[in-house]
Image: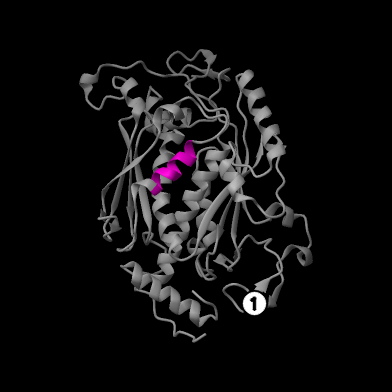
Amino acid sequence: MRRLRARPAAARRPSRRGQASVFRFVTAGESHGRALTAVVEGVPAGLRVDEDSIARDLARRQWGYGRSARQKIEQDRAEILSGVRHGVTMGSPITLLIWNRDWENWKAAMSVSPAGGEAKRITRPRPGHADLAGATKYGLDDIRPILERASARETAARVAAGAVARRLLAEFGIEVRSRTLAVGGRQAAAEGPVDWAQVERSLLRCADEAAERDMMNAIDEAMSSGDTVGGACEVVAFGAPVGLGSHVQWDRRLDGRIAQAMMSIPSVKGMEIGEASRMAAERGSRAHDGIEMGDAFRYPWRRTSNRAGGLEGGISNGEPVVVRLAVKPVPTLARPLPSIDLATGESVEAHFERSDVCVVPAVGVIGEAMLAMVLADAMLEKFGGDSLPETQRNFEGYMGAIGGPA
């Protein structure tokens, strides 16, 4: 195969210190407000994007055993309001809008206008939520404004934005998937090939059917006692090229950027890349991935294992990027924990509002969106380009220069 001379990427690659991301997004909206919105910036012109593909990811987020009745109300779909013309991105910011159907039942409580009437204050913070810390920080005597924005409902907007990133990554052969590894202390088999079709069929996004039945029993037991369960999930990106991220500054390290994105997901209290927990107990001779020459898909070398989870020194190494997330039980309980009333100082039970029993499968889908957006940012940081063809030329030149096909 003829080797291509690497072309310089577009000049959008300064140190990240003090610089905005290339691919970035912001969200707005409250759990029971009229709508959620995401604005996505940095997407090159020429990328095909459509509402149906975004809707598929939104449906996957809502799918799952142990979700609340609200998932049956919403049936999320994002409307594209800007940045796309005739199904193709224009290089300008993309605005995505998701209407909250449940807002019809909350018009008074969440009215933008003072004419909406005075809503009942919530003064009993829930342990494990942002209620108490948030109300204290913002000087509020009502925790409704905190729980509305801190709610995991906001992640629907993230998944919509992540679907755009996923479309961009697909142009370079990068695919992001997730699966459930544990729920309520019940573990799925984590080794060996994964049947991803089975994962997508599964109510818990689990490839191990026997373990899934045990997980569902754990959810049923928790539900019957007014409790909730957590667990663990795995998010994997296949096809990420070697060389994303950098070792030269702390804030350019790709593992750190992934960690920040994943830890921002509600209910995620821990994460590891690759086999970090197992490696911590091993000697170095058994912890790291050997390198040998061989006919790997993209490179003249290959790894003998992937314990590092696709990242070394803050840089992607060409192996699948593997991230595992620890998900705490949802803290809104049908049998509430002890709390205090902020208005009276009395000991009370915490506030209860409709809640999921288990969100582990949904966290996996949200994790896909967050990983896709981090990788999209890293790809554009390295390869630049204001149009998709320009980015593709830069990518092809780089891949040809290091000895592999694009």
Camera-nearest residue between 178 and 59: 59
Circle 1 residues within 10 Å: few <14, some 14–19, many ≥20: few
The number of numbered discs placed on residues in the rendered structure image is 1
Q: Which residue is mark 1?
A: 295
Q: Which stretch did the figure color magenta? A: 53-62
Left or right, 143 with respect to 222, comes to left
Residue 107, image quadrant: top left
Instruction: Specify whether residue 158 is in view.
Output: no
Front residue of 196/74: it is 196
Residue at left 49%, top 80%? 400
Q: Is residue 58 magenta?
A: yes
Q: Residue at x 56, y 22 (%)?
A: 333
Q: Position of residue 303 (x, y in %)?
A: 68, 70
Residue 349: where, in percent of width, then height? 54, 15
Q: Is residue 332 above or below residue 248?
A: above
Q: Secondary structure at mark 1?
A: loop
Amino acid type at image mark 1: Asp
Q: Nearer the viewer, residue 154 or 72?
A: 72
